[in-house]
Amino acid sequence: MSDRGALALVLHSHMPYVEGFGTWPFGEEWLWEALAIVYLPLLELLEGAPVTLGVTPVLCDQLETLTGDAGERLLAFLKDIRAPIHAEDAVGLEHGDEHAGAAEVRRAADDYTKAQRAFEALDHDVLGAFRRLADNPDGPELMASTATHAVLPLLATAGGRRLQVEVGTNSHARRFGRRAEAFWLPECAYDPSLEVLLAEQGVRAFCVDQTDALGLAALEQLEPMATAAGPIAVPIDWATIRLVWDERAGYPAHPVYRDYHHRTTHDLRPWAISGAAYDHAAARALATEHARDFLRRVAARLEIYRAERNRPGLLCCPVDTELLGHWWYEGQTWLATVLAEAAAHRVDLLPLSRALERMEPVAGRAVAASTWGVPKDLTTWDSPRVAELAVAARRGELDLVAAATSRNGSRRAAPALLRAARELLALQSSDWAFITTRELAADYPLERARGHARELDAALGAALADSGSEVDPRVRNLAPELDLHPLLVP
């Protein structure tokens, strides 16, 4: 790392458990689309890339199913759904004299053909491909997370928090052959004492949003902070993140880029944000220029820090991986340019753990409770609008802890308790409240949460009646290595 410091790009890859839970417009087609447009192309792009790559356990649970029936459903989606609807909508656009739009739809159909070839070349083993990425010592550092992306400060008990963290870190270790040094707190939701749980699992670093506490663009945002328990809290830099994340003023809002919201009959997107026909070549050229602008701004920010503080800084810039290719169609062109040209702009690009080896964290600074939500508190996941979800998750957690304590050691109750715990983990996913708050998927998140709450109650009833041996402990492939021990630790 140079005297100027380093940029840590953190790609947070996550999907709630949708495999086998509905299809179109809400359900497992979310996962198939992300695989086609984001994850499969990303595997090639990130070969040897010095970034931090989070792949949440619940996403891995679903990727693991692709070597079976789920993989066949993905192929059917690519071949029997995406291909014909591109052809059909192209004809419709031609009939409407939108010839440029029709040509764009035909071009975009190749995205799914390439995804099919890539998936088949991997012999359906996408999870193994992520593992091979991390095995390259010059490549991405993989980051662990909680079991199902629960907002930890909202959990009702210490045991419930420990269950989410331990299931997540154990899942990561089993699948990738090593324990992760870096950990993604879902929604960057932090409150004091969480670092103690992380330290128990050998976590060395986690990201936090300190924008409200330190101020937007404050130089302190480039200073990792030592915690009393040991793990290092790494502030994320919203002055940089908003360049790619701001819905109104960030790069993805430029009129030349493909419009995510303006769609054809079958949800295809042949128009630019400007309303004109989408020009893919022009959009890719713009994404390249935006990547260079990003690198210039990062270099300048690191240089200002070095000049002011006379030491290197760490600029941490996390984004949801799904932004790059899905929400922002040209995002992977942007990322490819950042990776290829960082050195030319004198920007050192390093994974979190490697960057932290080369600098001393600040000691004695308190880490403020926060999230990276809007606003930067817990209201996205805990407000009157989502009260039913929040209350159901807390009640279910308390009931499970009570039942597990009372039935501890009962072999007949064990399958039902495992089923109840998996239903609780599914219920605790932050996605249901986020999607509800943002009004993104009609009643799907509420119905999913209600379904998991019903199954949780039924499993607990069977466990307490000592008839739990008849209950299937599984929820598809969710948390296959689940252990109830964390719930019972004093």
Image (tube, grey):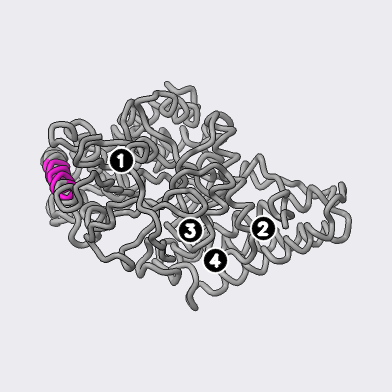
The Cα–Cα distance between marks 1 and 4, rounded to whole angstroms, is 43 Å
Q: Residues within 10 Å of mark 4 (few under 14, many from 20)?
A: some
Residue at horizontal 29%, vertical 32%? 110
Q: Nearer the viewer, residue 218 or 319?
A: 218
Q: Earlier in the sequence, mark 4 or mark 2?
A: 4
Amino acid type for the residue under numbered disc 3: Asp
- The chief SS type of the magenta part is helix
Residue identifier under label 2: 159
- Label pair 4/2, CB-CB below 8 angstroms: no
Q: Earlier in the sequence, mark 2 or mark 3?
A: 2
Q: Nearer the viewer, residue 98 or 430?
A: 430
Residue 388 visible at all: yes
Amino acid type for the residue under numbered disc 1: His
Q: Which mark is residue 431?
A: 3
- Look at the image and give the residue range highlighted in magenta: 289-302
Measured as percent of width and height from the top left, residue 185 is found at 47, 53
Residue at horizontal 76%, vertical 53%? 417
